[in-house]
Structures are given as C-alpha cells and as structure tokens.
Image (spheres, rainbow, N blue to C red):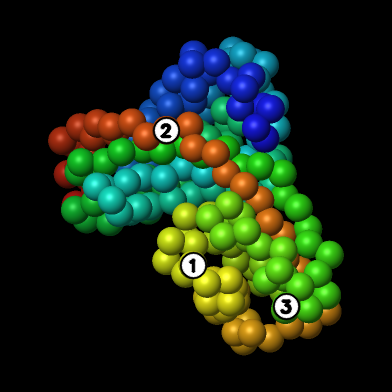
C-alpha cells in the first residue's frame, strides 16, 4: 500500500476528496448516488483499491463506511463509502463536519492456531483486524487501539461485535490484519437545505 501511495499525486488526492464530498452530500440529502465516470480519472484512481470514509465532528467520528477487500476501482469505492457514511447521519450531526478518506492495505490472513498466537501477531496502533467466525464477522480499524490498547481487551471487544464468546477460539475462527493510510481531512461544507433534510429524516 505504501508504494501505491507514492504514486498518488496531490491532484489525485484532491480528486478523491472532491468525489467523497460530492457523494457524501448526495447521501446526506437522500439523492440518487453520484456515479463517477471511472475512465475519466487517472489510472492510479482506476486500480482496484479498498477504502474507508469517515465524517468527523470535532474529535468525534460521527459516521464511517468502508470496504476491506478491493472489488471496484478506488474512485468508485470512495464514492460509495462516502455516500454510505453520510446517509447514516442522524439529526444534529450534519454541522461542522470534516471528511476523511483512508486507503486500506492488503488483507493478510494470520496462520495462528490459538488465541495466544493471534495476540502475538498483532501490532497495536498499526493493525486493523478482521475477525470471521462461521457466517459472522466484524472489524476494528487501527484507531480502535486508542480505546482498547491491551491486545486481549481489543480482541474480546471485537469478538463481541462478531457475536462470539470473548476469549473463545475455534477452528472455524479466522483472523486477518490490514493497515490503513489517511489521505487527510478537509472541511465538509453542508448547505442549509441538506441540514434541514437531515433534521426531517
């Protein structure tokens, strides 16, 4: 992922932020999702790449949407996630916002065979973790380490989100790690009519 980031020019990053803001505004207003014309963007933004988009209000994350495994071009993935994040806003959350776009690195499945081996493989504040168990799954992005800095606490909270018994391990449990890289945060200007729609939703 780091090599790919070096290929992103300031123009590329600006284009992604513009797409994210336009799509988020559509999501906030409840409009039909904006569909970027993929071929009109640089090749660096057409490659398959997963992302997260967050909406911040001060120090709080008020909404987030993302993908872990890449399946569509980066510009389309950012567009989709921005729309989804904004469409989840509740009354009063559509003011003083900032929007952040993050790229998701390659998903790496751990070969751990026990709870202890999983904990040994984790790097706090570096790894995002995807937990899969039977048909359920849950993920924590790397920033969640700020809330649960202890490896065991972190994983037990993730297990709860996946509907698992904390601390339990079975052969049907799979753990993967990934890293994220933020492209930065910019102010998200929300017109008054969009805020009104948010309140009336």
The 10 Å Cα crowd at callout 1, few under 14, some 14 to 19, many 20 or more, is: few
Q: Mark 2 packing: few (<14 Cα in 10 Å), some, or many (20+)?
A: few
Residue corresponding to mark 3? 116
Closer-to-camera residue (194/100): 100
> x and y percent of residue 103 in the render?
57, 38
Q: Is residue 23 left or right of residue 9?
A: left
Residue at 66% x, 51% y is 178
Give the Cα separation between the discs numbered 3 and 1. 16 Å
Assess disc 3: are there few (<14), some (14-19) or many (≥20) residues with their C-alpha within 10 Å of its C-alpha: few
- Report if residue 155 is visible in the image: yes
Residue 72: x percent and y percent? 67, 35
**Residue 13 location in percent, x, y?**
49, 22
- Residue 52 in the image: x percent, y percent? 52, 44
Which residue corresponds to mark 1?
149
Q: Which mark is residue 184?
A: 2
Task: Name which quarter of the figure residue 77 lies in.
Answer: top right
Marks 1 & 2, CB-CB < 8 Å contact: no
| Residue 75, above or below 167 | above
Q: Quadrant of the C terminus?
A: bottom left
Q: Nearer the viewer, mark 1 or mark 2?
A: 1
Dots 3 and 2: beta carbons under 8 Å?
no
The number of numbered discs placed on residues in the rendered structure image is 3
Q: Earlier in the sequence, mark 1 or mark 2?
A: 1
Query: Which mark sits nearer the N-terminus, 3 or 1?
Result: 3
Left or right of residue 118: residue 13: left
- Mark with earlier residue (3, 2): 3
Q: Label 3 to label 2, Cα distance in Å?
A: 35 Å
């Amino acid at each position: 992922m780091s090599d790919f980031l070096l290929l992103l020019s300031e123009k590329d990053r600006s284009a992604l932020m513009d797409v994210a803001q336009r799509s988020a505004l559509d999501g906030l207003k409840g409009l039909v999702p904006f569909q970027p014309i993929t071929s009109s963007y640089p090749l660096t933004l057409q490659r398959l790449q997963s992302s997260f988009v967050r909406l911040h209000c001060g120090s709080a994350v008020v909404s987030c949407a993302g993908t872990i495994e890449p399946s569509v071009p980066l510009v389309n993935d950012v567009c989709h996630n921005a729309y989804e994040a904004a469409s989840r806003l509740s009354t009063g959350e559509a003011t003083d916002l900032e929007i952040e776009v993050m790229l998701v690195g390659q998903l790496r499945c751990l070969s751990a065979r026990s709870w202890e081996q999983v904990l040994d493989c984790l790097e706090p504040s570096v790894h995002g973790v995807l937990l899969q168990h039977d048909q359920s799954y849950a993920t924590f992005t790397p920033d969640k380490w700020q809330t649960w800095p202890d490896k065991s606490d972190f994983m037990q909270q993730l297990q709860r989100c996946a509907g698992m018994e904390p601390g339990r391990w079975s052969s049907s449990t799979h753990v993967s790690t990934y890293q994220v890289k933020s492209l930065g945060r910019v102010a998200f200007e929300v017109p008054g009519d969009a805020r009104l729609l948010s309140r009336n939703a």
